[in-house]
Image (tube, rainbow, N blue to C red):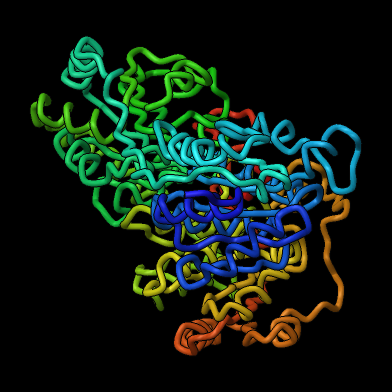
Amino acid sequence: MQMTGAQIIIECLKEQGVDTIFGYPGGAILNVYDELYKHSDEIRHILTSHEQGAAHAADGYARATGKVGVCMATSGPGATNLVTGIATAYMDSIPLVAITANVGKSLLGKDSFQEVDIAGIVMPITKHSMIVKDVNKLADSLRKAFVIAKSGRPGPVLVDVTKDVTGDLAEYRYKEPQVVKPHTSEIRQADLDEALRLLENAKRPYVYVGGGAIISGASEELYTFVHKLGAPVGDSLMGKGAYPGTDELYTGMIGMHGTKASNMAVTKCDLLVAIGARFSDRVTGNASKFARKAKILQIDVDEAEINKNVMVDCSIVGDVKEVLKLLNTQMEDRDHSQWIAEIEDLKERFPLKYNQEGLTGPYVVEEIYRVTGGDALITTEVGQNQMWAAQYYKYTKPRTLLTSGGLGTMGYGLGAAIGAKLACPDKTVINIAGDGCFRMNMNELATAVRSDVPIVEVVINNHVLGMVRQWQTLFYGKRYAHTIINDPVDFVKLAEAMGAVGIRATKKEEVGPALEKAIACGRPVLVECVIDQDDKVFPMVAAGAPLEETFDQDDLEDDED
């Protein structure tokens, strides 16, 4: 059947089962939007306040479901406004397809109005990017984009389409979407045998879980593996929820703001099993001193991650879920009760703690956990709010913490919360933000109101850029260069002006009732929680220091004495 390029785009999206798109129209992409208008009963389009919000919303939709998120934008600034969101998805291996329209072929390369080489711009931050200049190649290009986005190690793909292609005619025939299977061909029995030997000989094994365990859907296999091995387990920020944070073998997050128990366990273990983790600098600290007493076994779908940041003794390349299935079948149950007892002692001696006087960030997160019963879908911004959300909310299921880990994108969470709530309408979705992050993309609160998306935006307001100020306090002689936001902006009035509900809490006893009201009202709500500007995230490891040098407020006070 003969169709225009715009019609082909919509039909291909329907082929792939896309039910929601986030975007912003403009001149070059008008043909596509005109066709989308005719299919509004099949594909829901969410008009965001900014294209960056569209990319983050598509990202949040993808993280919450495991499906490919889709966003669209017009040429020039519309396309470049997607870049930060695309980079965010790339760093965290999130499947995303971004569709942009460019100027007509005859105008390419002439500095035409709203013309940029967006495929070239995003090349380093996508799995693949392409520009389609021939309508006959359009359908297969889009199909290819979805396959690339979700295969192997997932990631974003950009498809740029010239405006004339969206109006040209071509033959279109429906095709069933290509089934993307887990990568198993790289799994070698020799590697499994070497891994099994290390697991059998280990006296003090420790399991380090990253985001790959969530992406592969390996939570059940991971739980079985950990209990068969009889080993303590910790996670990276991206790995939270892959293993239940309430389990007795769980020790907490590893790294710069990880628990002392986890960081000391990594230092003391004789075998570190890294599952779907890439040894980020925020996890390892000084990489040359990371897990110095241990042999390291790394399991990852991406061969490029092996020996990239930390040299390992053994590796298994392949889909994490499939690798763990094989190991669980071939591995004997192990007993490391003495090692577990030692870890339990560390957990008891070094629990997470904070100042109980007055309203603090950790208290807010604990109240969110209490009020939701641990059953909410949490998104975060970046900074202190993000670390408190990682430390004090117990994640027991995968895809329940959505956060920008690799890129650390301030302004990510609100858009992601919108995408997550549309993907999971029956879940309570709460974005935990700082006031600095909220200012980045607060216009998306209007998107939530306009599209009737009942999310809860919790702004932990300390009137400073908290994490940067914390570093300035500890390492820069308290020279607070441009981190104090002491202005009269009223977030409650701002929320109300956008059509949302605004609630302010300044005392501990006000937080719980505010959250209960916010969740119950069924509308977009902003809850502002005002805390002290000198609240800090502890424990902490200074940049470039080894994990054994984890310190907290008590250690600082002891040093002063």
Q: Nearer the viewer, residue 431 or 266?
A: 431
532 and 397: which is toward the camera? 397
Q: Tell me: residue 260, above or below residue 443.
A: above
Q: Position of residue 35 (x, y in %)?
A: 60, 62
- Identify the residue at horizontal 40%, vertical 67% (top origin): 424
Q: Is residue 254 left or right of residue 50?
A: left
Q: Is residue 148 visible?
A: yes
The residue nearer to you, when weighing 193 against 110, is: 110
Q: Position of residue 174 (x, y in %)?
A: 39, 47
| In the image, residue 225 above or below residue 239 | above
Image quadrant of residue 232? top left
Residue drawn at (85%, 32%) of the image: 109
Q: Residue 345, relative to residue 53: is it above or below?
A: above
Q: Which residue lies at the image location 16% right of the left edge and 20% below the top edge?
A: 200
Query: Would you say 399 lies left or right of 187 here?
Result: right
Task: Report the number of discs.
Answer: 0
Residue 269 makes an appearance in the image: no
Q: Which residue appears at 36% of the width and 19% of the height? A: 296
Q: Quadrant of residue 374?
A: bottom left
**Measured along the vertical axis of the image, is residue 444 above or below residue 204?**
below
Q: Position of residue 60 (x, y in %)?
A: 51, 57
